[in-house]
Amino acid sequence: MRAEGFSLKGYLAQRRALIDLALDGFLPGEENDPQVLFEAVRYSLFAGGKRLRPILCLAAGEAVGGEMEDLLPAACALELIHTYSLIHDDLPAMDDDDYRRGRLTSHKVFGEGIAILAGDALLTEAFRLLTRRELMPGVEPGRLLAVAGEIAGAAGVFGMVGGQALDVRSEGQQIDLETIHRIHSLKTGALIRVSLRAGAILAGASKMELASLSDYGRRIGLAFQIADDILNVEGDRESLGKGTGSDAARGKATFPALLGLDASRARAEALVVEALGSLETFDERAEPLRAIARYITARDS
Amino acid sequence: MRAEGFSLKGYLAQRRALIDLALDGFLPGEENDPQVLFEAVRYSLFAGGKRLRPILCLAAGEAVGGEMEDLLPAACALELIHTYSLIHDDLPAMDDDDYRRGRLTSHKVFGEGIAILAGDALLTEAFRLLTRRELMPGVEPGRLLAVAGEIAGAAGVFGMVGGQALDVRSEGQQIDLETIHRIHSLKTGALIRVSLRAGAILAGASKMELASLSDYGRRIGLAFQIADDILNVEGDRESLGKGTGSDAARGKATFPALLGLDASRARAEALVVEALGSLETFDERAEPLRAIARYITARDS
């Protein structure tokens, strides 16, 4: 794949299709009982997500020569965990959102009890998927355990769940830039970073490669979050699929609210440049990762 | 340990102390941020639970000659999963319970948002614990992955979460004995059975031993549930620590409601006899498992 001939749009569409097919195959169907649970799981999982985390996992593995077959289960597990976190975050006791990506949220369709259980199910199935050795013939079990441990760490109290708890506790309060930075890095950054690490470890990355891909992940994770905050201020309802300005309405601290729009944009752009720097020693197999980084500050949804 | 000299009461107290110490060591402390999350996790985890699942895991491993050190992390992971399921089941959107074991439930103390996150945290930390190879030096990684996979299976859509979804869907409806049997075996039976399987697999049980311990687990799991249903009808507030008769008040189907008290008691006793039969070929190292089975129909709380 040559850099100048690389189409990010085509690449992302192809990867999304591959991931959706794998998710469909790994997850139990709606013919199971109780049907409402399996429907709720699939309703949120196939709701038009961008599949950013699994795409990053596959791209990191590819950048160091990994096999697609050995990467797909972990990539899908990351999407299951991301989806569970969205369902629980949308609940009335958390962000109380009625819409996500232009569709009613899980609890609005299935009720709160089933929405909570659908989230629990997705989290549990993610770890089950990570233990299915027969799906990953090229990966030795010790490496698989390391990946499952890293993912659990990034999803848990010192990662996503901890960040969401900080966010719940901070709502309506004055918080400083350091705190908002910390909330972002735990709530969304940790899972993005571990997506790259998981792909790299599964593909047998060297210590140096793993450290570089981690740095890349940390930087684009934060850049994505700042860009999302900016879109939340600027975007229109149509292109984002949910109400805009909703962070401000809830008194949530965001980068634009604290730094202003221009400084936030400059910060995101600097992070993209640094992320590209993390990939300096990689060959053309890292081109998708480079294109994804460049895309962050260029997108409008 | 000779059968006639064996004190179940002393054994259970010693095991509870061992498990509580291990849980305390494996779990992060309340000095972490945000404190409310770590407090909520520990509030429910150290609430006077009987530690049935970890005790069964350790006892199954011991019955086939396993090392305590190699069994404790999985035993504790099972308790984390059990505790998460109680927190989520007590939520207003599920069973809406204000008290458990005589104390306010998590959402009554910390609010619904933090209670949901505390459950999420416990489930996630359970899987993280199962990946920590350094804690289980005698267990090869392939065996650890098998155990994590079995536990995820028993906790997920074809186990505990599926059973809870069936229960939520059935509330207030007329259901038959087959359905109530199915709800019980998924909602509580699957995790009890896997507690025995996890201990057995970690200790290197033979195929025959594993099958026998699974049968034992399936039988006592159901016996415990029937005995709980009976206690729910008969017990008094003091000995159970929550309102009794609450299943009937909510229109929940129970064995006593469908079979009557006497037939329910006979059923539980028959299951205990069958469970003892599953252990026929085991030596005196299975004495704790035998004593636990006999205790089910004798206890009053």
Image (cartoon, coloured by chain):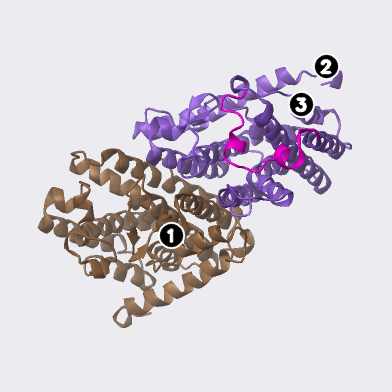
Chain colours: A brown, B purple
Judging by the rendered image, the residue that carries numbered circle 2 is B5
The three-letter code of the residue at mark 1 reads Val
Quote the CA–CA distance across marks 3 and 2: 16 Å
Magenta span of residues: B240-262
Direction from residue B31 to residue B62 in the image, left or right:
right
The three-letter code of the residue at mark 3 reads Tyr
Direction from residue B76 to residue B214 in the image, left or right:
right
Tell me the number on the disc at residue B295.
3
Residue A90: % across, % down: 36, 52
Give me the chain letter of mark 1: A
Q: Is residue A35 above or below residue B285?
A: below
Q: Is residue B245 magenta?
A: yes
Instruction: Give the camera-side residue of A70 and A245.
Output: A245
The three-letter code of the residue at mark 2 reads Gly
Secondary structure category for the residue under label 3: helix
Tell me the number on the disc at residue A76.
none
Viewer-nearest of labels 3 and 2? 3
Quote the CA–CA distance across marks 2 and 1: 58 Å
Mark 3 burial class by Cα count in 10 Å: few <14, some 14-19, many 20+? some
Direction from residue A180 to residue B224 in the image, left or right:
right
**Is residue B95 visible to us here?**
yes
State which quarter of the image contains the N terminus of chain A: bottom left
Judging by the rendered image, the residue that carries numbered circle 1 is A109
Give me the chain letter of mark 2: B
